[in-house]
Image (cartoon, helix red, strand yellow):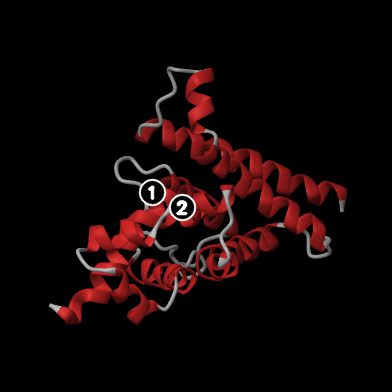
């Protein structure tokens, strides 16, 4: 039916952009998968860049692994940090099908698209702001802005290493397996290292 054409295009584009990245993906690939034609993309979405931006919005709306509100359950900041790391790692290193949005995120890290600003605002900034609030609550009140940023990026960097570096890690250590038990050990390791670094700021303040 004509009325479901935008939906089919968005679903197909989410898959193709996640697999290929913005630069390599073609409108021809998307319309073939959606069972429609290029004219439909031009009519509903104008051009490739606008289409991609709409796909990001659509993906966020249907994403079942969107971040919870780590502040709402009256958890202590230490517990919030642990919950954040667990969510972030499990989202990026899922046992089974990887999040399509996470795949797009990784494609943007490797080869930023013309709509990177939209990706940051929809995918990255909401997550970063939650982590920033958690880390700020753990640091001394007089902590410098630069120090706060360092600790936020340190947490994210440790988690992202296992997403970005997995192909190299498994070649350095072929016996690496990130099953559920190994995932929990990794969560605890990153949490312990991050919390120790944050607490060290109190001794220096």
Q: Which mark is residue 19?
A: 1
For the point 33% across and 59% down, the residue is: 28
Res 125 → quadrant: bottom right
Q: Around disc 2, counting alpha carbons within 10 Å, would you say few (fewer than 14), some (14 to 19), or many (20 or more)? A: many
Quadrant of the snapshot with the N terminus: bottom left
Residues marked 2 and 1 touching at CB (< 8 Å): no
Tell me: 41 left or right of 110.
left
Please state which of residues 194 and 112 is positioned toward the viewer in this rendering: 112
Q: Is residue 9 left or right of residue 65?
A: left
Residue 203: give x, y in percent of width and height.
83, 47
> Of all residues shown, which one is farthest toward the left?
1
Residue 64 appears in view: no
Point out the image quarter for the C terminus: bottom right
Residue bearing mark 2: 21
Give the percent coordinates (x, y) of residue 35: 19, 63
Look at 41% across and 63% down and name the residue there.
66
| Along the line of sight, the residue nearer the viewer: 89 or 172 | 172
Checking the image for residue 8, the label placed there is none
| Left or right of 110 on screen, residue 88 | left
Q: CA distance from mark 2 to mark 1?
A: 6 Å
Residue 172 lies, in percent from the top left, at 54, 18
Task: Answer few, some or many: residues within 10 Å of disc 1's Cα (few below 14, many 20 plus, some between 14 and 19).
Answer: some
Residue 47 left/right relative to 114: left
């Amino acid at each position: 039916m004509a009325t479901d054409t935008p939906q089919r295009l968005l679903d197909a584009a989410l898959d193709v952009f996640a697999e290929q990245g913005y630069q390599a993906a073609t409108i021809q690939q998307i319309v073939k998968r959606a069972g429609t034609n290029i004219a439909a993309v031009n009519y509903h979405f104008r051009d490739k860049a606008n289409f991609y931006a709409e796909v990001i919005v659509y993906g966020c709306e249907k994403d079942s692994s969107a971040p919870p509100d780590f502040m709402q359950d009256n958890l202590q900041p230490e517990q919030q940090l642990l919950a954040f790391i667990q969510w972030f790692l499990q989202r990026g290193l899922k046992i089974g099908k990887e999040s399509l949005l996470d795949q797009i995120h990784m494609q943007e890290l490797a080869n930023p698209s013309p709509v990177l600003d939209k990706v940051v605002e929809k995918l990255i900034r909401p997550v970063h702001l939650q982590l920033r609030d958690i880390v700020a609550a753990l640091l001394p009140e007089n902590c410098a802005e630069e120090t706060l940023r360092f600790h936020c990026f340190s947490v994210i960097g440790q988690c992202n290493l296992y997403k970005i570096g997995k192909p190299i890690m498994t070649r350095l250590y072929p016996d690496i397996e990130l099953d559920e038990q190994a995932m929990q050990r990794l969560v605890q390791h990153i949490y312990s290292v991050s919390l120790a670094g944050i607490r060290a700021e109190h001794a220096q303040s």
